[in-house]
Structure formats: C-alpha cells, structure tokens
Image (cartoon, grey):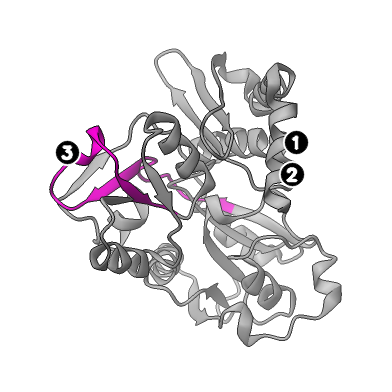
Amino acid sequence: MDSNKIIRIGTRDSELALWQAHTVQKKLNDLGYKTEIIAVKSQGDIILDKPLYELGITGIFTKTLDIAMINGQVDIAVHSMKDVPTALPIGIVQAAVLARANTLDILVHKGNLDFLKENATIATGSLRRQAQWLNKYPNHTVVDLRGNVNTRMQKLNESDWSGAVFAAAGLERINLKPTDFINLDWMIPAPAQGAMVVVAMGNDEFTLDAVSQLNDIETEICTYIERQFLKTLEGGCTAPIGALARYCELEDSFTFKGSLLSIDGKQKLEIEKIVPVEEWKKVGFNCANEILENGGAELMKTIRESLKK
C-alpha cells in the first residue's frame, strides 16, 4: 500500500450525498487508507467544455463529479446508484456497489389516510412513481416535486398536498423518516434503489484495489440485473420503469420483478420471473425483451414522443 496516497472522495454538498461520502470514507479508513472529502460545486458553477458531453455523460446528478474525476480533482465519486446512467463516461468504471439498504418507496403523509379513498394531490418528481401511483389511484392528481430530500420534505410540510413519495433509504440514512408514512410495497422501485455505488477512473489501480474491498457481490448482481433491464428497455430515454431483483438463498435463485408504464399510469406492463443463479447475466435483458415484444416497444415510442413535447 502506498502509505502517502490520499484517496480524494468527490461528493455533492447535500446532506444525503455527504452522508454517503462519509460512509465510504469510514470504510476506507477502517481498511487503513487515507482519505479526504471534496464537496464539488454543482453544475451551474462550472463551465462545461463541449468535448466532455461527447464522452456520453448523461446523468444530471453525476455529471459534475464525472468531470471533476476526469480532470483529476477527485479520485472517486459516491452516488445513489439509481441516479447513475447505465452507460458510464469513457474512462470511468464502477469500482464497488455497497450492501443495499431498504429498497422500498414510502408515502409520507400528514397523519390522516382518508385521502386514499377520495380525491387527493400527491407529490413526486419521479415519472416512475407518478405512473405507478396513478395506475393504482386514477382519481388522484400528481404534482411535481424536486430538490434534495430535505428540500422536498420542507415543501411537503408547507403545502396542502396529502402526501409525497420518497425512497425509504434516503430518509433513513439521514434520520429524516417521519412517523407518518406508509410502505408502498406494491410499488416496484427504481432500478438499483437503496444501493450506493462508487465510481473511479479505470486506469487508477491503487484506488480500484482499495475500493473493490467495499463491494457487496449480492447487491452488485441484483443491481446489474435491474440496470440491464432498464438499459434494454429505454435506450437512453427516461421512462416510468421499475425493477427489483432479489437473491433467494434457499433455492439459490433470483426473483425479478419489472414494470413499464405509460406516463399517465393507464397502461402497465409487468413481468415476474424466478431464475436459477447461474442464469443471472441475461435476466434483465430477457425480461426487457419480453416486455418490448408484448406491447413495450409501442409504449416506449409513445413515451418518447410525449417527453419531446
């Protein structure tokens, strides 16, 4: 081990992003590595040179950190894996996926659930959550809700909405999960929800070797299956897609659940499969293709057209 090398951990400066970076920092420190956290300013503070776009950077949450890494300002970046595009920029690789936290979506409400039986307004900035909510509650209105978890929670408290949908993992990580919530166990989460990923430069052997020790193989495989499903379905366009893979030790198999919905929630295509463990590499791909062949291709076309407007 190069005892003088400090691994610089890049992060956004939101509370959740910093929590994630500190978690990785502690794990690396426990292994004997020296680290430093560098909070990188958001995209608006950086002049983006056009050539960097040509590297295939698409993730709005990850772009700033990708650029900082490519420019040599940080060695690794820590992300909520569900925010990371399925295609990483050239030169950047997935170095580790940490053991997964809670995968559920939850509805944070204001102490009274009567609205579930009547008309109500629910807030979420996610197309997937919006579509699944409207599929189950077609008489409800869904409004847009953006910002980091703290901002969104504050907006909910100040609003007249009945509730808002959050990822349980994010709220649990920074102790923001209120007492008034219900688990939405019927909602299929975003691919890789509840998992954190560490990315690094593909040619940085020291850092890759250090970070690889944090990898959780079961989470890595489950998120691979989910992200392969996503990638095969969408081909770079945002769509209401849910995916969840789980390992079942008893039967040495993976269960997979995937869904694609229309933005208004009226159309829903779902798939559920149990596959032996040795077939994991193709599960996401095969399930996505099955959906595409059974109405999914037409639905994706409609989604692309409506998002262009």
Numbered-mark total: 3
Q: Which residues are magenta?
A: 96-124
Instruction: Give percent across and percent down for residue 113.
Output: 17, 40
Q: Amino acid at mark 2?
A: Glu
Q: Is residue 87 shown above or below 16?
A: above
Task: Report the front residue among 10 and 27.
Answer: 10
Q: Are marks 1 and 2 in contact (CB under 8 Å)?
A: yes
In this picture, residue 20 sits left or right of residue 253: left
Question: At 49% from the left edge and 50% from the top edge, which residue is drawn?
Answer: 126
Task: Give yes or no for contact between labels 3 and 1 (Cβ–Cβ under 8 Å).
Answer: no
Picture residue at 51% right of the left edge, 25% below the top: 257
Q: Picture coordinates of residue 245 (x, y %)?
A: 50, 29
The residue beneath circle 2 is: 305
SS for callout 1? helix
Q: Counting other residues with Cα less than 10 Å from the Cα at mark 2, is it few (<14), some (14-19), or many (20 or more)?
A: few
Q: CA distance from mark 3 to mark 1?
A: 37 Å
Which quadrant of the figure contains the N terminus?
bottom right
**Which residue is depicted at the point 33% across and 31% down?**
185
Q: Amino acid at mark 1?
A: Lys
Q: Position of residue 260 (x, y in %)?
A: 59, 31
- Going by the image, does 269 lie left or right of 295? left
Residue 251 vertical position relative to residue 173 in the rendered view, above or below: above
The amino acid beneath tag 3 is: Asp
Check disc 1 and report the residue beneath it.
301
Instruction: Give the left or right position of residue 103, taking residue 236 as reference.
Output: left
**Quick one: label 1, few (<14), some, or many (20+) residues within 10 Å?**
few
Residue at the spot of label 3? 114
